[in-house]
Amino acid sequence: MALASVGGGYQFTDGNLSELTIGTQAAQQTATATATLTVTQTLGGLLVGDPSTSAATYTLPTATAIDAVMTNMKTNSTFTLRVINLGTSTGLITVAVGTGITAVGNLVVAITGSAAGVGGAAEFLFRTTGTAAYTLYRVA
């Protein structure tokens, strides 16, 4: 099935706000033990963490570092990061914010098969609130 030559989910500036977003997903980024994530790991959209049986903290890069790469972001622009936790036993992942990022919601990514309704994955939404300033929302 061919996609229409107009519409189809592409958003340029403030246009096409009600269109379906069609995207691509690069290969997942990975992390194991406690680390400061790179901008590439954060902007990749999908991070697979495997802290094994030890808890780990993944610290996000600073808002300034994100801005240096995401030069076209304007206030209220967003991007997402999904984190999958393959850890076992006590291998929880805690996401810590970098300078210039404010967190809203639970930043702990439980292990797969843990308490009902918690799961082994989380989705985070980054929203630009100004120059070198983001709010990070746990949305799932």
Image (spheres, rainbow, N blue to C red):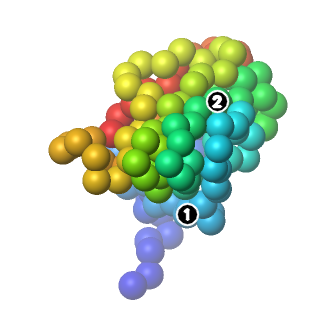
Callout 1: few (<14), some (14-19), or many (20+) C-alpha neighbours within 10 Å? few
Residue 90 percent location from the top left of the image: 43, 42
Residue 131 percent location from the top left of the image: 70, 16
Residue located farthest toward the left when viewing the structure as drawn? 116
Foreground mark, 2 or 1, reads 2
Q: Residue at x 66, y 15 (%)?
A: 100
Secondary structure, mark 1, is: loop
The correct choice, above or below, for 36 with respect to 43 in the image is above
User: Label 2: which residue?
Assistant: 59
For this view, does 117 lie left or right of residue 84? left
Q: CB of mark 2 within 8 Å of CB of mark 1?
A: no
Q: Residue at x 23, y 42 (%)?
A: 115
The correct choice, above or below, for 45 with respect to 80 in the image is below
Q: Earlier in the sequence, mark 2 or mark 1?
A: 1
The residue lying toward the viewer, choosing from 16 and 136, is 136
Q: Amino acid at mark 1?
A: Thr
Residue 67 visible somewhere in the drawing: no
Residue 50 visible somewhere in the drawing: yes
Q: Residue at x 35, y 34 (%)?
A: 139
For this view, does 116 lie left or right of residue 70? left
- State the mark number for residue 42: none
Residue 58 percent location from the top left of the image: 61, 35
Callout 2: few (<14), some (14-19), or many (20+) C-alpha neighbours within 10 Å? some
Marks 2/1: CA–CA distance: 25 Å
Quarter in which the N terminus is drawn = bottom left
User: Label 1: which residue?
Assistant: 24
The residue lying toward the viewer, choosing from 26 and 4, is 26
Secondary structure, mark 2, is: strand
The residue lying toward the viewer, choosing from 53 and 105, is 53
Quarter in which the C terminus is drawn = top left
The residue lying toward the viewer, choosing from 88 and 45, is 88
Q: Amino acid at mark 2?
A: Thr
